[in-house]
Amino acid sequence: MPEDWAGLRAAVKDCRACRLCETRTQTVFGVGPESATLMVVGEGPGADEDAQGEPFVGRAGKLLDEMLKAIGHSRTTNTYIANVVKCRPPQNREPADDEAETCRGYLEQQLRLVKPKLILALGRTAAQRLLMTDDALSKLRGPVHRWGPDATPLMITYHPAYLLRSPGEKAKSWDDLKKVHRFLNA
Ligand code: URA
């Protein structure tokens, strides 16, 4: 696994390690300052991201940007955004086990390079993959977890695509974001 940003970026760009490379338009690496204090992790690129090469640029991405803005965060100033898989799964299906595992090293290296103060996992797939558990989102959301060799704090909230489908859950997500804000400003 390349140890620096340039090497990692190049490795992802040409990656053919799983079948998702056959249907992608391009890889979607990540976006944001390389020394961000907050690192947000989603599931995988959708159609808009596959077309533009940047994570969270579709409808869910607009909502994510609004959520981040409410706590003084953005992808241009202090937040790095990446996904569990770097290539769009066909029909926006959930990444398969082998696809997520094949891609794991890239995300882990991004996390190690950014060294955020806090990781925010969006939705079940990101939470389960980062924490290597099958526990339900309802159980995972709430406590502060720890990730990786430095035991980086990790919080979990709903995926913005889910919030678009279930706007009634936005209040709970807002509670999570307030917690993120308090944590980062403590
Ligand atoms: N959903 C995700 O999980 N990631 C994206 O980049 C876009 C939508």
Image (cartoon, grey):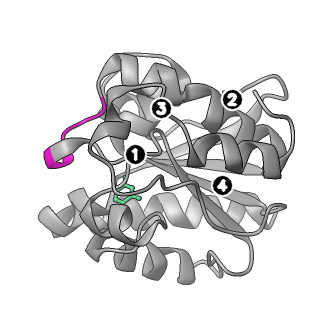
Judge from the rendering whether residue 122 lies leftward or rightward of residue 106; answer left or right. left
Instruction: Please tell me in which quadrant of the rendered image residue 153 appears.
Output: top right
Could you say where residue 59 lies in the image, as x and y percent from the top left?
Answer: 27, 76
- Camera-side mark, 1 or 2: 1
Disc 1 marks which amino acid?
Cys
Which residue is the site of mark 2?
A: 147
Judge from the rendering whether residue 24 lies leftward or rightward of residue 77; answer left or right. left
Q: Nearer the viewer, residue 71 or 108?
A: 108
Is there CB contact under 8 Å for labels 3 and 4? no
- The C terminus appears in which quarter of the rendering? bottom right
Which residue is the site of mark 1?
A: 87
Which residue is the site of mark 4?
A: 39
- Camera-side mark, 3 or 2: 3
Could you say where residue 163 lies in the image, as x and y percent from the top left?
Answer: 24, 63
**What is the magenta range?**
91-95
Disc 3 to disc 2, C-alpha distance: 27 Å
Disc 1 to disc 4, C-alpha distance: 19 Å
Say the numbered circle drawn on residue 16: 3
Element on which disc 3 rests? loop
Disc 2 marks which amino acid?
Trp
- Camera-side mark, 1 or 4: 1
Q: Residue at x 44, y 82 (%)?
A: 66
Q: Residue at x 50, y 17 (%)?
A: 132
- Camera-side mark, 3 or 4: 3
Q: Residue at x 80, y 38 (%)?
A: 112
N-terminal label among 3 and 2: 3
N-terminal label among 1 and 3: 3
Disc 3 marks which amino acid?
Arg
Of the four image quadrants, the one with ligand 1 is: bottom left
- Answer whether residue 93 is magenta in the image: yes
Q: Circle 4: is it few (<14), some (14-19), or many (20+) Cα within 10 Å?
A: many
